[in-house]
Image (cartoon, rainbow, N blue to C red):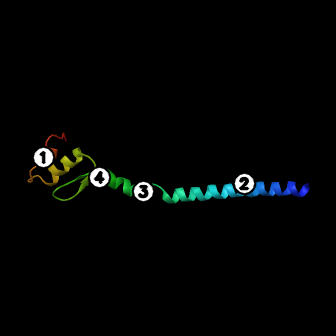
Amino acid sequence: MSQLLFSDMARGQQKIQSQQKNAKKQAGQKKKQGHDQKAAAKAALIYTCTVCRTQMPDPKTFKQHFESKHPKTPLPPELADVQA
């Protein structure tokens, strides 16, 4: 009887250790995967200047860029109605 009781306790300890090891492994994988800020920033740049190929996040910034960097070039039609 005492041997059976001891083996149950040992297995309980192994189970706890296994759960802790698994939790640590999962946290490591999650941390390793992480959040890629570079990819997120690149995904946010959806407007591309037709002259210099610079990327911008919104039409207002795009229009300001175009007017300041390319004043002699006619404004693209998609920027005609944008308020800068």
For badge 1, the amino acid type reads Pro
* Label 2 crowd bin: few (<14), some (14–19), many (20+), radius 10 Å: few
Residue 5 found in image quarter: bottom right
* Residue behind mark 3: 36
Q: What is the C-alpha distance between the residues marked 1 and 4? A: 19 Å
Q: Earlier in the sequence, mark 3 or mark 4?
A: 3
Vertical placement of 20 versus 79: above or below?
below
* Label 1 crowd bin: few (<14), some (14–19), many (20+), radius 10 Å: few
Judge depth for marks 1 and 2 and give the one in front: 2
* Residue behind mark 4: 45
Which numbered marker is on residue 50? Answer: none
Who is closer to the viewer here, 6 or 58? 6
For badge 2, the amino acid type reads Ile
Which numbered marker is on residue 16? Answer: 2
Is 79 displayed left or right of 35 in the figure? Answer: left
Instruction: Assign a secondary structure to mark 1.
Output: helix
* Residue behind mark 1: 77
Q: Earlier in the sequence, mark 1 or mark 3?
A: 3
Residue 1 found in image quarter: bottom right
